[in-house]
């Protein structure tokens, strides 16, 4: 059941409905014929493991000697051949409006980048300097490199040391990976070779066309042009973004728990909604329409009943608050309430009346989203925003959600809060408030794949991500005690890491078992993607790090004897 659930969620849940996509490049490629749900059962340990990957836990993100935070890209270590980017984030309390940053490699003779002014970055509005793809390491030798950081005009200054590893210590798939693209009926799909997206391409293309057709039907509109969909082999944010193009996370170890079908539909609705336009479309309704027309946020769900469960749980956020501060509110609650509000308005006045209202909202200079919503409500439905919320809230009060549904809402929120906590602490470039999002055209022009191909993959990351996957699969199956146990294991470890404890995984028995399993498999050349734990046995989906045949999935069986996990 575990593997069936994993395949249903990670690959294509055809009963589900939602969004994501990006730009075009190159010639068409042929699609694989093997089905995406197949994997190989490994019955023996590989006989030889090539050159070991360096231990990157202490090398990937150097600590600065100041209060400024340094983030390096690509992540998971730097290798000869990388185009390296630097993010330098100023302390929140620093007054650096007129300050600049200069970076130099191996002073005094090495290349200098900048000076460049600090500027706002991401939804989180971080004050930082971003040097993107400035340090070309192609002609350098492996070893230590000193980097000097200078805040101008009068400091602080500090120095860090980074390590460049030999290129041939990367897995073979990373060395040969390039951007590819292929056209479906509706879209141009971009993906990186040697990844799960290439392995599962046939099914992905079928799902892209299916969800595009359904989204067009829901909005009674046709796409003006081909939609570009970028398949990212790493988690970023909650797994989907849309601007002119759609970006979707697709990988075997998708710890954010989303599924391709749902995310695709959601983001395709955004593309069509933006195409249809309007005077001013408030975020509350932009996201609410995408959730409503997709039948749910991360999965199909009864929106009004689930919003009623939020009220019972004491988690209801006033709609006026959401209108003016949507993205900084708790993510799942905000999206669920937005979708439920749209559903309520459609039930009250019909879709046609709602859409006329939605596309007629105007935004006066200096006015808030809530004020714009209020003015259009009075003009179209003869009630103000406060009165609308009172009617909506009364509808929620009249609902009686089942205990099963209430528990599902509760554990959905706590699961995703744990995902974001993990990201903020240990996968910072994935955290939605400041995600490292790159334009596909720029990546194609520079030939950059490493920034999306590589992401934190130490034993610590692998353990916490497989625990999150375990939690999401149990949540999908309505197994709430098991969901809670896995979520508690993640947070117990994060608590210990936050406190600076060395043996963080001893904080929870499930985490300790997962950590031992992960380390055992890494020592054999496998990278775990999902783990199902029994009392004395475990089943694992894993990839072989040194494969020359792409990311094939192996099913491994481990047993626990004398407190040691080993391959059966």
Image: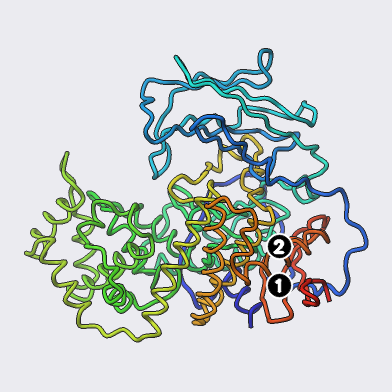
Query: Percent from the top left, x then y, of residue 59?
Result: 68, 40
Query: Percent from the top left, x then y, of residue 153?
Result: 45, 14
Whether residue 222 can be seen here: yes
Cα gap from disc 2 to disc 1, whole angstroms: 9 Å
Q: Secondary structure at mark 1?
A: loop
Task: Specify the quadrant of the image occupied by residue 38.
Answer: bottom right
Q: Secondary structure at mark 2?
A: helix
| Label whose residue precedes the other's in the sequence (2 or 1) | 1
33 relative position to 378: left or right: right
25 relative position to 557: left or right: left
Look at 22% across and 56% down and name the residue there.
321
Q: Nearer the viewer, residue 12 or 331?
A: 331
Query: Percent from the top left, x then y, of residue 395?
Result: 19, 78
Look at 31% across and 84% down and name the residue there.
401
Looking at this view, name the residue that lies furthest to the right.
Answer: 47
Question: Image height check: is 64 above or below 484?
Answer: above
Badge 2 is on which residue?
Answer: 199
Badge 1 is on which residue?
Answer: 35
Specify the quadrant that holds the C terminus: bottom right
Q: How many marks?
A: 2
Query: Percent from the top left, x then y, of residue 221?
Result: 36, 62
Look at 61% across and 20% down and name the residue there.
104
């Amino acid at each position: 059941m575990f593997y069936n659930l994993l395949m249903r969620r990670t690959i294509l849940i055809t009963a589900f409905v939602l969004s994501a996509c990006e730009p075009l490049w190159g010639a068409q490629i042929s699609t694989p014929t093997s089905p995406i749900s197949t994997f190989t059962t490994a019955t023996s340990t590989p006989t030889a493991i090539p050159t070991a990957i360096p231990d990157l836990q202490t090398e990937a993100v150097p600590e600065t000697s100041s209060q400024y935070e340094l983030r390096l890209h690509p992540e998971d270590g730097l290798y000869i051949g990388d185009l390296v980017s630097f993010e330098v984030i100023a302390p929140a309390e620093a007054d650096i409006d007129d300050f600049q940053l200069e970076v130099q490699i191996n002073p005094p003779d090495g290349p200098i980048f900048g000076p460049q002014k600090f500027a706002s970055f991401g939804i989180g509005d971080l004050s930082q300097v971003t040097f993107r793809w400035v340090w070309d390491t192609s002609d350098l030798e492996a070893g230590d490199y000193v980097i000097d950081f200078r805040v101008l005009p009068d400091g602080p200054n500090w120095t860090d040391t980074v390590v460049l590893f030999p290129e041939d210590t990367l897995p073979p798939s990373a060395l040969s990976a390039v951007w590819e693209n292929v056209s479906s009926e509706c879209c141009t799909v971009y993906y990186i070779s040697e990844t799960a997206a290439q392995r599962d391409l046939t099914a992905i293309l079928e799902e892209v066309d299916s969800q595009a057709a359904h989204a067009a039907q829901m909005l009674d509109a046709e796409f003006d042009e081909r939609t570009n969909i970028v398949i990212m082999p790493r988690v970023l944010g909650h797994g989907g973004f849309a601007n002119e193009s759609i970006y979707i996370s697709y990988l075997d170890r998708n710890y954010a728990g989303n599924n391709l079908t749902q995310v695709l539909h959601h983001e395709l609705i955004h593309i069509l909604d933006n195409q249809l336009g309007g005077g001013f479309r408030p975020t509350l309704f932009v996201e609410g329409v995408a959730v409503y027309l997709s039948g749910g946020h991360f999965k199909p769900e009864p929106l009004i009943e689930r919003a009623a469960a939020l009220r019972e749980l004491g988690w209801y956020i006033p709609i006026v608050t959401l209108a003016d501060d949507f993205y900084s509110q708790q993510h799942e609650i905000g999206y669920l309430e937005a979708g439920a509000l749209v559903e309520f308005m459609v039930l009250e006045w019909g879709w046609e009346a709602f859409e006329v209202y939605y596309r007629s909202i105007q935004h006066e200079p200096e006015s808030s989203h809530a004020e714009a919503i209020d003015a259009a409500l009075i003009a179209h439905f003869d009630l103000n925003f406060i009165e609308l919320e009172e009617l909506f809230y009364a509808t929620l009060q009249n609902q009686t959600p089942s205990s099963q549904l209430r528990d599902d809402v509760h554990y959905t929120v706590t699961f995703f809060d744990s995902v974001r906590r993990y990201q903020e602490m240990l996968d910072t470039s994935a955290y939605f408030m400041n995600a490292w999002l790159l334009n596909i055209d720029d990546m194609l022009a520079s030939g950059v794949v490493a920034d999306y191909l590589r992401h934190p993959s130490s034993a610590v990351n692998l353990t916490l991500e497989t625990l999150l996957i375990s939690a999401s699969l149990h949540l999908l199956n309505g197994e709430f005690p098991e969901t809670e146990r896995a979520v508690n294991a993640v947070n117990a470890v994060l608590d210990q890491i936050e406190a600076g404890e060395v043996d963080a995984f001893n904080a929870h028995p499930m985490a300790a078992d997962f950590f031992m399993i992960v380390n055992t498999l890494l020592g054999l050349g496998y990278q775990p993607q999902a783990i199902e734990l029994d009392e004395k046995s475990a089943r694992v989906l894993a990839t072989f790090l040194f494969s020359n045949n792409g990311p094939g999935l192996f099913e491994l069986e481990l047993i626990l004897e004398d407190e040691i996990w080993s391959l059966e």
